[in-house]
Image (tube, rainbow, N blue to C red):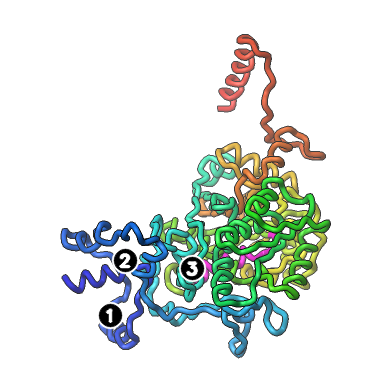
Amino acid sequence: MAASLMLRSSFLSPCPQLHHQSTTATSKSNNVSHSFIPVKATASTNDAISPQKHRRPADVNIREDAHRHCSSHNFSARYVPFNAGPSSDEWYSLDEIVYRSRSGGLLDVQHDMDALKKFDGQYWRTLFDSRVGKTTWPYGSGVWSKKEWVLPEIDSDDIVSAFEGNSNLFWAERFGKQFLGMSDLWVKHCGISHTGSFKDLGMTVLVSQVNRLRKMHKPVVGVGCASTGDTSAALSAYCAAAGIPSIVFLPANKISMAQLVQPIANGAFVLSIDTDFDGCMQLIREVTAELPIYLANSLNSLRLEGQKTAAIEILQQFDWEVPEWVIVPGGNLGNIYAFYKGFQMCKELGLVDRIPRLVCAQAANANPLYLHYKSGWKDFKPVKANTTFASAIQIGDPVSIDRAVFALQNCNGIVEEAIEEELMDAMAQADSTGMFICPHTGVALTALFKLRNSGVIAPSDRTVVVSTAHGLKFTQSKIDYHSKEINDMECRFSNPPVEVKADFGSVMDVLKSYLLSKNTEQ
């Protein structure tokens, strides 16, 4: 019984205990796994894990409570040049302020996989599942519930979290059946988050690390980003929660009012600049090279460590079964690599035995990756991004192009594009079945339509479309569509209000006509 209680105590601990190497070797020789598997509850074991016995005192907050229950481990991570060969000895501590390798290339966060592999896939699955829906700091967050795979060395006191993640994986039953003939279509609503987009997943990691650096008296006076809307909202919210100044460069008149008001309301220092996103990105890189402002764009690989947890969540929500396809909208292209990295870590650490095929969907008005893919991955050429309703991916010179190509080539991935009418129609069709999505998700759904129509995606394939932002951020585009006020667009699925006189007969006539038309459709 004592051994059973010790096992349960280890399993319930927010931080996993590492076993001594010799113990592991002995257990392996006896064919005993180190997975922490819950034992069947009995009266005595229930007493041992009673919530009343472990409930924190009223004068102890959840951060302090985390310290009382957290065990030590030897997990670690560091920056290395992206896709560096085995002979490379270049690396940097995560506590250094560095965004590029010595050669000027991208960096990646590399975890000590040997340390993580001392626990098998069953252990990690059970640990992650045990944290879902809890308030234990910081594991109530979908990001920080995977802390050992994200920022293993950060102290819980330094974490800045709004318990982001754990977003809805929505079974798009009616949309799939009605428009695509699919019965296993799902939409990962990453926009159901603190600031209304998937950017929260990466920003909690980045701002937490900045919080740590400032406590270490590193030269960081604030955090800055270039943004097409969602990044600035996430940055300003998390910086406001931590009391850290945030600086935002926005392209003037190119983002929605709902996106603009978020950083303003959160107290960010907002510069509206007469250029596009690529121009803002160039300026913020120049500024952060001269001033002690920490760069928050996805050039910074810390962001991707949080974003990769959405991929792990998808597997978790399917009870660790792997879908055939995952479709992700792409602009600056960090997210497609983040999803690949999350899936690949799960495979390498034994949680699953394969990864899904990824599709990156771009707006035709800002499609450098699509053109690169269609050329057979020959010399990449940036483009001048034209205006698109999918404004967050209106990027012609993506920072993470090398990451995206690596991810897609290693999962037999595909790139598709959507013209403006296609993406707006797809958004309207999705909304008509109960969703309320952003134009970027319309881009991803358009890619799905094309791949279904060409037979690449089969009707029985389990497919996940990643929705990156909440539709409420893009109400003006929806208003314009349903009012049929978009030039050169038919708006085939518009649903404008019907004007009717304020008398019973007129209302009845309109209603009878409507109900008759619906009955005919059925």
Q: Are marks 3 and 2 in contact (CB under 8 Å)?
A: no
| Cα–Cα gap, marks 3 and 2 | 28 Å
Q: Is residue 114 above or below residue 201?
A: below
Question: Residue 407: percent from the left, percent from the top?
Answer: 61, 69
| Cα–Cα gap, marks 1 and 3 | 25 Å
Question: Residue 135: percent from the left, percent from the top?
Answer: 40, 57
Magenta stretch, residue numbers: 331-347
Q: Quarter-wise, where is residue 480 in the image? A: top right
Q: Quarter-wise, where is residue 361 in the image? A: bottom right
Sequence-earlier tag: 3 or 2: 2
Q: Answer yes or no: is residue 84 visible.
A: yes
Q: Dominant secondary structure of the magenta stretch?
A: helix
Q: Which residue is mark 1?
A: 31
Quadrant of the drawing holding the C terminus = top right
Please give the name of the residue rendered at 59% of the width and 50% of the height, measured from the top-left corner: 196
Sequence-earlier tag: 1 or 3: 1
Please give the name of the residue rendered at 66% of the width and 44% of the height, measured from the top-left corner: 426
Question: Residue 216: percent from the left, percent from the top?
Answer: 55, 77
Along the viewing direction, whichever of 347 and 294 lies nearer the viewer: 294
Q: Which residue is mark 3?
A: 354
Q: Is 43 left or right of 168, judged from the image as shown? A: left
**Amino acid identity at mark 3:** Arg
**Amino acid identity at mark 2:** Leu
Q: Which residue is mark 2?
A: 12
**Amino acid identity at mark 1:** Asn
Along the viewing direction, whichever of 408 and 248 lies nearer the viewer: 248
| Cα–Cα gap, marks 1 and 2 | 24 Å
Quadrant of the drawing holding the N terminus = bottom left
Question: Residue 178: percent from the left, percent from the top?
Answer: 57, 39
Q: Is 151 left or right of 122, judged from the image as shown? A: right
